[in-house]
Amino acid sequence: MSKSTEEAPKEEEKAEKPEKVEKPAAKAEKKKKKEKGVYSLYRIENDKVVRLRPTCQRCGPGYFMADQGDRYTCGHCGFTQYKPAAEK
């Protein structure tokens, strides 16, 4: 007995590969931020040093609060103090 094995022709299905997106050669350069030093927290008026930002009520006089537009926030403990609303 002779067995004839007939195989169906195999169709190779090529999976469609997504087209590669070309990346730019170099990323856009980031702008360097100006380093803020201690001089940005104080101002000298009439031979006296004046603090420009309030100090944290919880942490004490060594911690300045960050100015966030409508509020002041302490970076050490997270205390938030809202500024009074400006009347129009």
Image (tube, grey):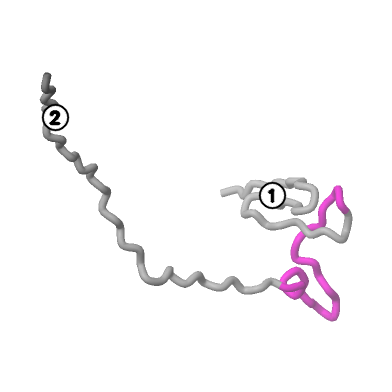
34 up-or-down from 71: above or below? below
Q: Amino acid at mark 2?
A: Glu
Label 2 residue SS: loop
What is the crowding at mark 2: few (fewer than 14 residues within 10 Å), some, or many (at least 20)?
few
The residue positioned 12% from the left and 34% from the top of the image is: 9
**Percent coordinates x, y for residue 15 in the rendering:** 23, 42
Q: In the image, which is nearer the foreground, mark 1 or mark 2? A: 2
Q: Which residue carries the number 1 mark?
A: 83
- Corner quadrant of residue 12: top left
Name the residue furthest top. 1
Of 73 and 46, which appears nearest the observer? 73
Per the model, the C-alpha gap separating discs 1 and 2 is 82 Å
The residue positioned 75% from the left and 56% from the top of the image is: 65
In the picture, the disc for residue 7 is 2
- Disc 1 to disc 2: CB gap under 8 Å: no
Magenta stretch holds residue 86? no
- Corner quadrant of residue 8: top left
State the extent of the magenta-drawn residues as a range: 37-59
The residue positioned 81% from the left and 70% from the top of the image is: 50
**Percent coordinates x, y for residue 39 in the rendering:** 75, 75
**Percent coordinates x, y for residue 79 in the rendering:** 77, 46
